Amino acid sequence: MRCFFGVGVDHQLALELISLRDRALEHLDGAGPGPVSAGNFHLTLAFLGDLPADRLPLLRDCARAVAPAIP
């Protein structure tokens, strides 16, 4: 499972990013990857790579230690 620590972006920023993304894709003429949906926009703080699912509890504990409001 690909794991990372990240934070989401607010709606207004997502709209601005969509505009930038769409303008950038216009110049690729379909030669690039498909667009990322606004719901997937985030700021990656740390990419952890591929980890087994049994590591998730440890990752959640680490995240909660830094940001206790994480579900």
Image (spheres, rainbow, N blue to C red):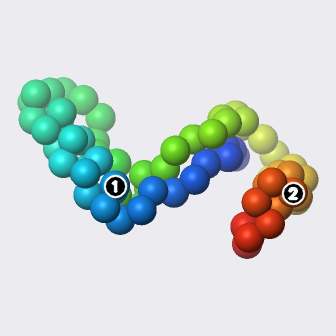
In the rendering, which numbered label is found on residue 13? 1
From the top left corner, tell me how far across and down residue 27 is, in percent.
10, 28
Task: Give the quarter of the image for residue 56.
Answer: bottom right
Mark 1: give few (<14), some (14-19) or many (20+) Cα within 10 Å.
Answer: few
Residue positioned 61% across, 48% down in the render: 6
Residue positioned 33% across, 56% down in the render: 14
Residue positioned 76% across, 60% down in the render: 67
- Amino acid found under the numbered disc labelled 2: Ala
- Amino acid found under the numbered disc labelled 1: Leu
Q: Secondary structure at mark 2?
A: helix
Label 1–label 2 contact, CB within 8 A = no
Residue 54 visible in image: no
Q: Earlier in the sequence, mark 1 or mark 2?
A: 1
Q: Is residue 21 above or below residue 16?
A: above
Residue position for label 2: 65
Q: How far apart, in angstroms, are the residues tagged by discs 1 and 2?
A: 27 Å
From the top left corner, tell me how far across and down residue 51 is, in percent.
78, 41
Task: Give the quarter of the image for residue 31.
Answer: top left
From the top left corner, tell me how far across and down residue 15 is, in percent.
26, 58
